[in-house]
């Protein structure tokens, strides 16, 4: 199933659960044209979209988004999200948990200085191997990072001996 329309989302503040559990969604052909400048909530937007690659999402305006909780949980997303403005994101709980093909490409560029919840962000992710050392000095003190990388199938991002001691506490398997 492919979503081909371009809905008027110019005044929408929430796209939470928009495609949640849409296992047969493969593409949103006009995704790059979506106007998301007012959206603050992307909770579970693509959760359980197993065949969705995410093509077109790279160009989205995420500058006002506060929550990306479960956004790609158990999905097939495999796109570079490095161009996203994440300066206002507060909640990344399970954002990429159980992803099947997501490598994490581009995440090192994210501004995570406002985020307070990274709990289980990559829990059980299969391919995510991005180097997130740049986040080490940007994460706010007191941010929840419990089981951030728990049971990741690719642990190279946190097993590197260069990774600072602050990351070691977040790698509960």
Image (cartoon, rainbow, N blue to C red):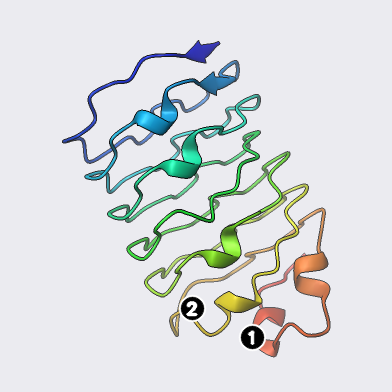
In the rendered image, which quarter is residue 89 located in? bottom left
Outermost residue toward the top in this view: 1
**Inter-mark Cα distance, 1 to 2:** 10 Å
Marks 1 and 2 close (CB-CB < 8 Å): yes
Residue 22 at least partly seen: no
Q: 75 above or below 7?
A: below
Q: Toward the viewer: 82 or 100? A: 82
Give the x, y percent position of residue 172.
73, 69
Q: Residue at x 43, y 81 (%)?
A: 140
Q: Which mark is residue 166?
A: 1
Q: 163 above or below 87?
A: below
Give the x, y percent position of residue 21.
52, 24
Outermost residue toward the left in this view: 11
Outermost residue toward the bottom in this view: 165
Q: Residue at x 62, y 31 (%)?
A: 53
Q: Residue at x 37, y 72 (%)?
A: 114
Describe the element under mark 2 as helix, strand or loop.
loop
**Crowdedness near tag 2: few (<14), some (14–19) or many (≥20) residues, C-alpha within 10 Å:** some
In the picture provided, is 150 more to the left or to the right than 24? Answer: right
Q: 56 above or below 137?
A: above
Name the image quarter holding the C terminus. bottom right
Name the image quarter holding the N terminus. top right
Circle 2 residue: 139
Describe the element under mark 1 as helix, strand or loop.
helix
Give the x, y percent position of residue 63.
31, 55
Q: Toward the viewer: 128 or 8? A: 8
Q: Which mark is residue 61?
A: none
In the rendered image, which quarter is residue 74 located in? top right
Q: Residue at x 27, y 38 (%)?
A: 14
Q: Nearer the viewer, mark 1 or mark 2?
A: 2
């Amino acid at each position: 199933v492919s979503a081909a329309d371009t809905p008027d989302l110019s005044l929408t503040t929430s796209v939470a659960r928009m495609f949640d559990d849409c296992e047969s969604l493969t593409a949103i052909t006009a995704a790059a044209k979506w106007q998301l400048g007012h959206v603050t909530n992307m909770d579970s937007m693509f959760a359980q979209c197993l065949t969705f690659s995410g093509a077109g999402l790279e160009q989205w305006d995420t500058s006002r988004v506060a929550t990306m909780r479960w956004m790609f949980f158990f999905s097939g997303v495999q796109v570079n999200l490095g161009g996203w403005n994440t300066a206002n994101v507060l909640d990344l709980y399970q954002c990429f948990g159980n992803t099947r093909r997501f490598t994490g490409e581009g995440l090192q560029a994210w501004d995570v200085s406002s985020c307070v919840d990274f709990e289980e962000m990559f829990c059980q992710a299969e391919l995510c191997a991005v180097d997130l050392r740049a986040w080490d000095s940007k994460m706010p003190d007191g941010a929840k990072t419990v089981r951030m990388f728990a049971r990741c199938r690719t642990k190279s991002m946190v097993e590197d001996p260069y990774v600072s001691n602050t990351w070691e506490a977040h790698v509960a398997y």
